[in-house]
Image (cartoon, rainbow, N blue to C red):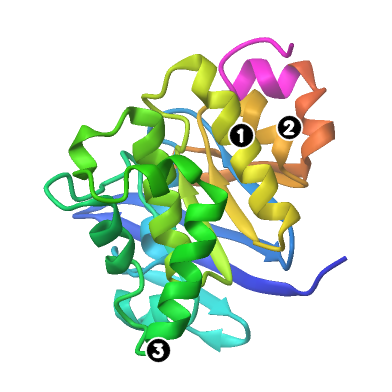
Amino acid sequence: MGEVILKVENLEAHYGKIAALKGISFNVRNDQIVTLLGGNGAGKSTTLKTLSGLMRATGGKITFFGEDITKMPPHEIVKRGLIHLPEGRRIFKDLTVTENLELGSFNLKDNHERKRRMDNVFDRFPILGKRAKQMGGTLSGGEQQMLAIGRGLMAGPKLLLMDEPSMGIAPLIVRDISNIIRQLHDDGTTILLVEQNSKMALGLAKYGYVMDTGSIVLEGKAKELKNDDNVVKAYLGGRKN
């Protein structure tokens, strides 16, 4: 079992006076895929935004590799290797594929290392290499998701926060995205995965936390959560397959 690299303790966050996170605690261990599950409004995306500094925590503590990052600005958190791939891909549609990828390495001063990372992204996603000079907006939904993942890899992640990577993607391509996530993990990337597609997420993850209205209501090994009809029915929007 790997070491705990992310420790979240009693984390709180608010939208105005509304409590979005109500004192949640969880861990992510090195070389694991951990998933946060739950319906719309459960607080999953808010959790990722708070971890990456895009939203300010109003209580609790976030420790990454033993360092308190709770009040750090986003660019400092990125420097430490905690990389957030937001919901909806958020690529720059008026920039080329190459330019989008280069933006992922804005903290990197070593041009040789930048080229090495770029080559690795193109090896992993050959279609991006073929489209290197195309504008991001001309790519399909699945290709844009690959570009978003590639941009995250350019930052040299020690932990990748992935928010709804299957959202808005054709069902046939969801399987490809699932395989990409599995391959990233096999290559040593630790992932915290937020996914509405609970079947996909629990098929990939080692451990899962179920959220409901800003609280963690359940946790356990992904396999056990996946096989519990009551969990699936109550929190994950359907019957297990």
- Mark 2 vs mark 3: in front: 3
User: Alpha carbon of mark 2 to alpha carbon of mark 3: how far?
Assistant: 37 Å
* Amino acid type of the residue tagged 2 in the rendering: Gly
Q: Is residue 195 above or below residue 32?
A: above
> How far across and how far down the image is residue 159, in percent?
57, 66
What is the x, y in percent for residue 125?
50, 46
In space, the residues marked 2 and 1 are separated at their CA atoms by 9 Å
Q: Amino acid at mark 1?
A: Ser
Q: Circle 1 is placed at which residue position?
A: 178
Q: Residues within 10 Å of mark 2 (few under 14, many from 20)?
A: few
Residue 220 in magenta stretch: no
Give the quadrant of residue 238: top right
The answer to whether 185 is drawn above or below residue 155 in the figure is above
- Image quarter hosting the N terminus: bottom right
Q: Does residue 235 belong to the magenta stretch?
A: yes
Residue named by callout 3: 110
- Give the label on residue 23, or none: none
Return the x and y of residue 167 as percentages of the image width and height: 41, 29
Residue pictured at 50% horizontal, 15% vertical: 171
The quadrant of the rendering that contains the C terminus is top right
Residue 187 visible (yes or no)? yes
Q: State whether residue 71 is above or below residue 17.
A: below
Q: Mark 3 or mark 1, which is nearer the start of the sequence?
A: 3
Q: Does residue 193 appear left or right of residue 208 in this picture?
A: left
Q: Residue at x 19, y 55 (%)?
A: 16
Q: If you read the primary sequence from the N terminus, does the residue marked by circle 2 or circle 3 appear first? A: 3
Q: Earlier in the sequence, mark 2 or mark 1?
A: 1
Tell me how far mark 1 sits from mark 3, CA to CA: 32 Å
| Span highlighted in magenta in the image | 230-241
Residue 203 is marked as 2
